Amino acid sequence: MPDIRQEIANLLRTAKKVLITTHIRMDGDALGSSLGLLRTLRESGTAADAVNASPVPSQYVFMPRAGELFESVPDPASYDIFVALDCANEERLGFDMSQLSESCVTVNIDHHPTNSRFARYNFIDGKAPCAGEMLLDIIQRAELECPAYGAQMLYIALLTDTGRFSFPNTTQRAFDAAIRLVRKGADPAEAANSVYFTRSPKMLRFLGHAYSSLKFLFDEKFAYISLKEKDLHTFGLDKYDTQEIVDIPRLSAASKVAAFLLELDEGITRISLRSKDSLDCSLIAAHFGGGGHKGAAGATYDGPMHEAEKIVCEQVVKLLDIHDAEGECS
């Protein structure tokens, strides 16, 4: 059987023009992988563009350079390869890829075990620490020269998706990739400073509000925060500025499951989940039609937050195998 990694590497090495995208509401892995591949291809002499249907979150605005991200898909017929990174299904792209499927060879590189394999070439590895690490392997197989800036973007992908090298996906593969990226010019100190230590005053005030909203249930084994989009507007922020909120309830020593629920203005609720001690929070996400990893997952509920909150609590009871939790979910 042919190696899918080498097949994709061959496609990228011989491509004339590549379009790159990732999931909406980009995180560090999504954006870092996109920019890392973009800069590598351009440095190697291949025409390439990147597109995303959502704006760059404030935490990562330092990453893209001017003109590097389109907000909508340019002329599909002008590309011969379409690459989706860190995206578990076609719906999370935020746009219709049917025209691209007709004119381009489609490639899907992702580390989510729930990936729907929506492209012609699908490289899915649920044991990979991040999509950026998978992409580094393909770049090397394609014998493309990853510039220092590209290495920095891929390092940020690795840094953020491993939770600063603290999540269960922090394996030997993660450290091996970090070493290779540093050798290519990535600067770990600069990456950490740019991602984690450049918060605006309004963001710090909002984080204070989020901390004050923290709730505990089931002997503090479940910690969560529930907010509404209008809370963000009060601090001059928007719905894309909430990626780190779920890490607040996860900080608790007693918590086994952590969640962040955000009710959007249009009446739907986003659910972000984290878990510890080998508990699989993706089972909760799956109940809502979402997915992810054992330790980190997410979903969207088509309804108000108080309904989503009750269902999440009921699912946490099942996950924690609690037999006497009557009344605590109401």
Image (spheres, grey):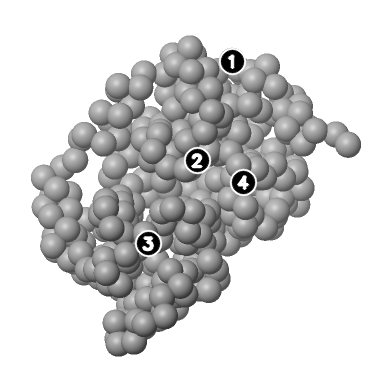
**Nearer the N terminus, badge 2 or badge 1?**
1
The disc labelled 3 sits on which kind of residue? Val
Quadrant in the rendering for residue 48? top right
Mark 1 lies on residue: 145
Instruction: Work out how far the residue at label 4 is from the one at label 3, CA to CA, in angstroms.
Output: 21 Å
Could you classify mark 1 by the number of other residues whose Cα lies within 10 Å: few (under 14), some (14-19), or many (20 or more)? Answer: some
- Say the numbered circle drawn on residue 169: 2
Q: Toward the viewer: 61 or 194?
A: 194
Please give the name of the residue rendered at 76% of the width and 47% of the height, measured from the top-left corner: 120
Q: Residue furthest front?
A: 323
Nearer the viewer's eye, disc 4 or disc 3?
3
Quadrant in the rendering for residue 309? bottom left
Mark 3 lies on residue: 257
Dot 4: what SS?
Answer: loop
Instruction: Work out how far the residue at label 3 is from the one at label 2, CA to CA, in angstroms.
Output: 17 Å
Q: The C terminus appears in which quarter of the rendering?
A: bottom left
Dot 3: what SS?
Answer: strand
Please give the name of the residue rendered at 29% of the width and 42% of the height, measured from the top-left corner: 59
Instruction: Work out how far the residue at label 4 is from the one at label 2, CA to CA, in angstroms.
Output: 10 Å
Please give the name of the residue rendered at 11% of the width and 45% of the height, measured from the top-left corner: 201
- Say the numbered circle drawn on residue 126: 4
Q: Taking 111 as reference, is 120 left or right? A: right
Residue 212: x %, y % from top left: 13, 62
Instruction: Work out how far the residue at label 4 is from the one at label 1, CA to CA, in angstroms.
Output: 26 Å
Dots 1 and 3: beta carbons under 8 Å? no
Q: Toward the viewer: 68 or 176?
A: 176
The disc labelled 1 sits on which kind of residue? Glu
Please give the name of the residue rendered at 37% of the width and 61% of the height, measured from the top-left corner: 257
